[in-house]
């Protein structure tokens, strides 16, 4: 089955190469494909990096599934996925994976009279809403979390992302961690079968549907909340504190995670310990072949190294959260230990 | 004598050769379509095979679509596809008929050109624009005005009430049907207009001469004369409605559920594929999506084949009369 899309993408690549052959810097260009969530920041990094070094990055944001397929087929230098591959999958395909940038998912609501940050929610309650067990805003479970708010007797309209996405994965992964019933009935994936609610396409679709429907609850990427000023809810985290979605709380979740112990960086940052940790945080991952003969491997690593060191401010401007320094150091150690080109270690680059 | 015929023969030969080249070229063009079609069908069968082998006939009869447990059934998508297309046809066909009759029979001559062009322009609007229009313009109107009224008026009636229950989300099967209706309208209208225009003038004039009213001429002369064309136009519209992807994805609500209410969110085959293909990880999941594609292929093919059969029958009956 993989044949079908990959032949197609290979043809596209061939066309792209033909077109690119007219440009000057083709030989040095790095190619990657995958997740759509980090695309804006990868594109911005690529632009700045090209201006500095003359080396371009050709990133196709075709979705995590496509990215994984392409790196497995070896048609790109790196793949990108919002959902980490498990250690066994990595080993089977001879891949190495590491986190590149952090993002978070934020629940947004549309309740008359409730302003951004006023509503307090916890994971099990959100899970019950999305399973249809809580169907009114003045339900005792919600009212108990919000003694100061007077919530209306309004039907809850759950809105979910209909397109398979990393956002869906993080959201359902978090709900599965905090609610055994959710884990059993629905589970975590880039798409799941929701028993109630309506599916809207993309962040903008969810945001729009939530804004239009009185009583709606939805979930969108953090950047979207920040840029549109939607009514977000504060969440109760693993340590029992209510936190607001902001760069600081995402970074807290990433910092308190124990990356060193996670084999193949298989770590999903939802429900992490730490007083300030935002509970629905996640990293976007890069995948590369452990042993390759692709001459673009070293330039790609140089690009990632540059992004870790110099790309942080750009990430913050676009409301992504850069990886904490201690994690990026760990990643570089991984490069050193497990990546080779033509049998020689690929990092540190000479 | 022979001195004249020899160059003539050479020319004949040359012409015969160029005729042969021309014929082969046209035949190759036609064959290419068949090869492409066969290729698509084979790719879909090959890609969808793992899913069909795993779920067998259950793929058609289950509405569960659960990527987590890897259980896939196409029934909800199939249902949504058929229902949204039916709503679209129910609205678009009478409307297109009205427009076509107006344009060919009752419209003042100076207005015919502009209206006809406007309708054809509608066909040139990209489907994503219809999707955005549906989501940002049509859905709020339906949500705040139309659907509450429908629920209040029909919701409590027996039988028919089941079609209009549940919260007014604004998006759902009905909205998708409305958007599709607007999208297929130009196709059906153009075809109907063409076939109405093709009715022989002498027939119509004879009917008027016998004292027939305008309605009688349209109903008894124009319509029977253009039956085949009308069905052809409807099939063209239906084909487009069944396969439309982007606009539907925006407004259908994207829920793999079957509910009797037209206001409820649902999904269609093409919307499911568009939504889920990019992030589908795992063989069975992608295979099930491709199997959905195969299903749409078969569905569309069946409908076109049925239309052909119907046309054949009409022609035969026409010949008997």
Image: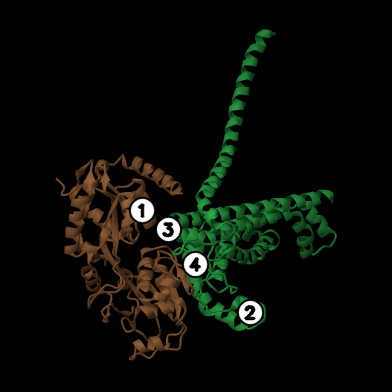
Secondary-structure class at tag 3? loop
- Mark 1 burial class by Cα count in 10 Å: few <14, some 14-19, many 20+: many
Marks 1 and 4, how far apart at CA: 25 Å
Quickly name the residue at label 1: A68
Q: Which chain is green?
A: B
**Where is B164 relative to A326, above or below?**
below
Quarter of image, res B233: bottom right
Residue B254, label in figure: 4
Q: Is residue A186 left or right of residue A281?
A: right
- Disc 3 is attached to a residue of which chain? B
**What residue do we see at 42% from left, 62% from top?**
A164
Pick the residue in front: B232 or B268. B268
Percent x, y for residue A225?
32, 73
* Residue at 21% across, 47% down: A299
Residue A263 falls in image quadrant: bottom left
- Badge number at residue B280: 3
Residue B161: assigned label = 2
Q: Earlier in the sequence, mark 3 or mark 4?
A: 4
Q: Sort mark 2 into few (<14), some (14-19) or many (20+) by Cα contacts within 10 Å.
A: some
Residue B267 tag number: none
Nearer to us: label 1 or label 4: 1
SS for callout 1: helix
Whether tag 2 and tag 1 are in contact, CB under 8 A, the answer is no
Q: Which residue occupies the foreground of this view, B25 or A191?
A: A191
The answer for which chain carries disc 2 is: B
**SS class of the residue under badge 2?**
helix
Q: How far is the residue under mark 2 from the one under mark 4?
A: 23 Å
Identity of the residue drawn at 56% across and 59% down: B59
Residue A192: horizontal and vertical position, in percent? 44, 67
Q: CA distance from mark 2 to mark 1?
A: 48 Å
């Amino acid at each position: 089955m993989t044949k079908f899309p990959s032949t197609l993408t290979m043809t596209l690549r061939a066309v792209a190469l033909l077109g690119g052959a007219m440009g000057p810097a083709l030989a040095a260009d790095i190619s990657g494909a995958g997740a759509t969530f980090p695309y804006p920041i990868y594109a911005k990094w690529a632009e700045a990096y090209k201006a500095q070094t003359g080396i371009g990055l050709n990133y196709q944001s075709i979705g995590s599934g496509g990215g994984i397929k392409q790196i497995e087929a070896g048609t790109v230098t790196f793949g990108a996925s919002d959902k980490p591959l498990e250690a066994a999958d990595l080993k089977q395909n001879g891949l190495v994976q590491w986190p590149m940038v952090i993002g978070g998912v934020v629940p947004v609501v549309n309740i008359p009279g409730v302003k951004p940050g006023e509503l307090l929610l916890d994971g099990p309650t959100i899970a019950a809403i999305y399973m249809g067990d809580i169907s009114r805003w003045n339900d005792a479970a919600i009212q108990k979390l919000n003694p100061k708010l007077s919530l209306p007797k309004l039907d809850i309209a759950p809105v979910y992302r209909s397109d398979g996405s990393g956002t869906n994965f993080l959201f359902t992964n978090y709900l599965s961690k905090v609610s055994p019933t959710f884990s059993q009935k629905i589970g975590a994936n880039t798409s799941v079968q929701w028993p109630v609610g309506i599916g809207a396409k993309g962040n903008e679709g969810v945001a729009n549907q939530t804004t239009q429907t009185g009583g709606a609850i939805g979930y969108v990427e953090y950047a979207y909340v920040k840029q549109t000023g939607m009514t977000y809810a504060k969440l109760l985290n693993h340590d029992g504190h209510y936190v607001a979605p902001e760069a600081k709380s995402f970074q807290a979740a990433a910092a308190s995670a124990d990356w060193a112990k996670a084999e193949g960086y298989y770590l999903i940052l939802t429900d992490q310990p730490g007083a300030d940790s935002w509970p629905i945080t996640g990293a976007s991952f890069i995948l590369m072949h452990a042993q390759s003969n692709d001459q673009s491997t070293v330039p790609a690593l140089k690009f990632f190294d540059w992004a870790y060191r110099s790309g942080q401010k750009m990430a913050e401007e676009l409301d992504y959260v850069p990886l904490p320094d201690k994690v990026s150091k760990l990643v570089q150690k991984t490069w050193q230990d497990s990546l080779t080109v033509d049998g020689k270690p690929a990092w540190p680059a000479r | 004598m022979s001195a004249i015929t020899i160059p003539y023969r050479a020319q004949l030969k040359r012409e015969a050769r160029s005729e042969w080249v021309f014929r082969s070229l046209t035949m190759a063009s036609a064959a290419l379509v068949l090869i492409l079609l066969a290729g698509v069908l084979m790719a879909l069968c090959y890609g969808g095979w793992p899913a069909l082998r795993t779920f067998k006939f259950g793929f058609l009869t289950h509405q569960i679509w659960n990527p987590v447990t890897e259980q896939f059934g196409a029934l909800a998508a199939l249902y949504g596809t058929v229902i949204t297309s039916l709503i679209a046809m129910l609205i678009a066909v009478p409307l297109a008929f009205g427009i076509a009759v107006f344009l060919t029979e009752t419209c003042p001559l100076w207005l015919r050109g502009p209206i006809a062009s406007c309708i054809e322009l509608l066909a040139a609007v990209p489907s994503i624009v219809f999707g955005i229009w549906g989501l940002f313009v049509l859905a709020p109107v339906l949500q705040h005005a139309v659907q509450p009224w429908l629920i209040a008026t029909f919701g409590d009636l027996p039988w028919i009430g089941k079609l209009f229950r549940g919260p007014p989300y604004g998006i759902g099967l009905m909205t998708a049907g409305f958007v599709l209706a607007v999208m297929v309208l130009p196709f059906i209208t153009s075809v109907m207009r063409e076939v109405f225009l093709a009715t022989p003038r002498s027939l119509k004039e004879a009917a008027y001469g016998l004292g027939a009213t305008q309605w009688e001429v349209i109903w008894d002369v124009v319509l029977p004369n253009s039956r085949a064309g009308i069905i052809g136009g409807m099939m063209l519209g239906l084909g487009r409605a069944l396969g439309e992807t982007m606009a539907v994805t925006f407004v259908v609500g994207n829920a793999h559920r079957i509910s009797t209410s037209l206001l409820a969110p649902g999904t269609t085959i093409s919307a499911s594929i568009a939504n889920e293909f990019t992030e589908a990880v795992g063989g069975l999941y992608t295979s099930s999506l491709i199997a959905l594609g195969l299903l749409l292929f078969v569905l569309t093919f069946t409908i076109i084949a049925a239309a052909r059969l119907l046309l054949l029958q009409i022609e035969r009956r026409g010949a008997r009369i």
